[in-house]
Structures are given as C-alpha cells and as structure tokens.
Amino acid sequence: MTSTWIEPASTATALLLLGRGTDPASERGVDCPGDLPAPSDPDLVARATAAKAALGNRVFVLGHHYQRDEVIQFADVTGDSFKLAQQAAARPDAEFILFCGVHFMAESADILTTPDQKVILPDLAAGCSMADMAVLGQVETAWERFEDLGITGEIVPVTYMNSSADIKGFVGRNKGVVCTSSNAKRALDWSFEQGSKVFFLPDQHLGRNTAVLEMGFDLDDCVLYDPHKPGGGLTDEQLRNARMILWRGHCSVHGRFTLDSVREVRERVPGVNVLVHPECRHDVVRAADFVGSTEYIIRALDAAEPGSSWAVGTELNLVRRMALAHPDKQIMFLDRAVCYCSTMNRIDLPHLVWALEELVAGRVPNQISVDPDTAHHARVALDQMLALP
Ligand code: SF4
C-alpha cells in the first residue's frame, strides 16, 4: 500500500478555540490566515549551505519538529523543546546556538548554556501564544491572592516548558518545578509529595489531562484561574478545595482540534487510530486512542504497522513530514482544515540565511539573553525537573 498525503483544506478561520469567537483577546497575534507559507527562494539554500560551512563548528543549529522543511534541513539536531534544551546544554564548544524554534525555547537554551555561548533566534517575532498567556505580573497577583488565603504553604507551582523565563524563575523561587509533556505526571507526582495543591502554568489542558487521565483526579478537583477576571474568577472556597489550580492558558494550535474532528475522521476512515498531543482539549484527549508528547507521536508513527491508518492531532508541519516519511501508512491531519503554528513558521529560510550570514560577517543578530537573577531561579526549577525520580 502506498498512501498519498492530502493537504488539509485552507481556511480563513481565526483560531478562537476556547471562546469559539468570544475570546479574541487571548489569541493576540495568532491566526490561521488560510494559506500555507509561501515557499522560499530556492537560491537561499546555497547561501545557507555556504554560510553554515563557513561557520563550521562555531555554530550549532537546533530545529524544533514544528519548523518548516526548508529550515529543518539545516538543523544539526531536531527535537521537541526539552530535547533541544538538553542538546544546547550538551554543546559547550559551540560559540553560537542558532535556535530554529520559538522564544521561550531560546530562553531555556540561554539558561542552560555557558555564559560565553550566544543563543540566536532568527526572528524575534517567533513567540508562543501559550507562553504569552501567562505574564509574570499576572502570576504574582494570583500568588498574592493565594497568600491572602493562607494557602501558599500547600501549593507547589509547576510550569510547563512552554513558558517564559520569568515564569520559570517565579516557579524556581517558590520551590516548584518545570515539566514537559513527556514528564508531566512525574512532575505532578513529585509536587504532590511536597504539597497538597498544584498551581499549574500556563497550559490548562496539559495540567487537566495529566491530573485526571493519568493520576485519577476528578474534574471537580481542578479549577481554572482566569487572570482576566477579578480574583481569577474563583471563590475562596473553590481555591481552598482545589487540588489543581489551572492557569487559563492553552495552545492555539492544539486547542483547535475538537470532538467533532475525532468523530468525523472515525466515520470517514474506519479503523483509524486517533493520536493526539496532551495540549489538546480534555474531551479530545478522552476520545483519542493514543496521547503523548511530540517525541511519543513520532515514535508511535515510526513503529506503526504498514497499512495502518492514523489521524494525528498536532502541528501540521510535523504531521506532513511524518506522512511523507511513511508512505506505507495512512497518516493524516486530524482536522480537515489547515493549521500550522504561525509563530513557529516565522522562522523561514530568509531569516535563517540572514542570521547565518550576519554571524559570518562577525555580527551577532537577535541574541536571546536572560538576566542573571531570572536565569538563576529558572535554572533551579529546570534542574528540579532533571532530578525528577
Ligand atoms: S504549537 Fe502551541 S505551544 Fe507550540 S509554539 Fe506554537 S502556540 Fe506555542
């Protein structure tokens, strides 16, 4: 059997998943304009090749799985955010770490590399809408509310890797831990040994899915803290009774998949395996056959039986790449309409060429630098993650 990749249909629908059009404020800068990015000038491939060769071992290029093919071809290593952070830390000899990913990842790389190394993000506009949903001032306001209630002694803050260095620093200062989608359960197990409540930032879905589906909590054990509402929109009693206080943040890409997407693909493709990322909404994850991190998704598709069918709920660049790499399996995007991570896609070949050629010319463009105090505390929370049993 040879399967043919079918590109999802274009859509001009803005991504307003949680609010379904009622909450545009939480989706600033993120939309799905309806077309895949225009292909870059093929001549740029030769320029990128030449500049990278000129830099040799001085530069180490990291490529996140959600990056465009035209960029990923120049990556020395590909991975999810955690693997790339580890890889950055494992290359102390590279003068420049060129991070083809988004801002919070480059910050983590800067925290984990030596002071002499320089981390570069080819386009400073490559942010992450989820990370942007938790701003330090908002989080400190929430913590003050918890202090007023006298419950901070019971709370362990946990932040997903997909958060700013400021938020990781806050978590480190308050004896918490960073987690990834691969180790979220281990991080929560550890946290509930330290306290009786967790304050989970910024992805409500990863927090809820892990607590309910992997740890046996009830949905009622989880409350949603909305930074845009007075007091987070929660009563004192709700906060006192909660086991999981979830921040009201989400991924604008994974939040796009709905229960209807799952039902529709099951009707259309009998026997299909539905495989989703835990950043998807709770009802979607419940309805799926398999759930796991980006690395898990890649391993599952690599190991799948020839002839099997898979509807995958994660970023489009990765799903397309996996489908083309496995023509003996039917791999499709879970949603019928196109959606990629628009901020990840800001890193294109022109930006990569520009960054490489600047380095060749002796200039350091778009260096990402975390201030030492924030970096110190963020590192405490990252090291606690690395020390998880
Ligand atoms: S896929 Fe979601 S979580 Fe990942 S960078 Fe894009 S918006 Fe952020």
Image (tube, rainbow, N blue to C red):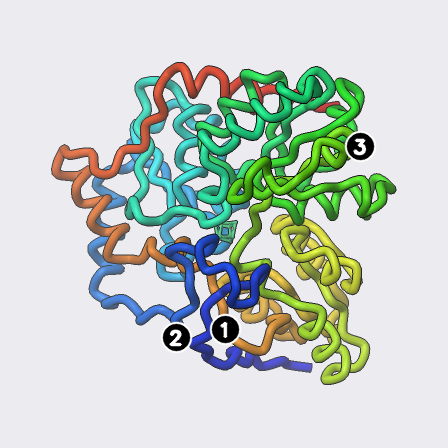
> Mark 3 and mark 1: span between their CA atoms?
41 Å
Which residue corresponds to mark 1? 338
Disc 1 marks which amino acid? Val
C-beta proximity under 8 Å, tags 1 and 2: yes
Q: Going from the N terminus, do you reach mark 3 or mark 1 first?
A: 3
Tell which circle, 1 or 2, labels the residue nearer the N-terminal end. Answer: 2
Residue extending farthest bottom: 268
Dot 3 or dot 2: first in sequence order is: 2
In the picture of the structure, the residue carrying the numbered disc 2 is 35
Q: Residue at x 48, y 33 (%)?
A: 138
> Which kind of residue does numbered mark 2 sit on?
Asp
Count residues near mark 3 (Cα–Cα under 10 Å), then give few for <14, some for 14-19, many for 20+.
Answer: some
Could you say which is closer to the camera, residue 92 or residue 383?
383
Work out whether residue 11 can be spotted: yes
Q: For the point 48% across and 42% down, which residue is it?
A: 131
Give me the disc on residue 241: 3
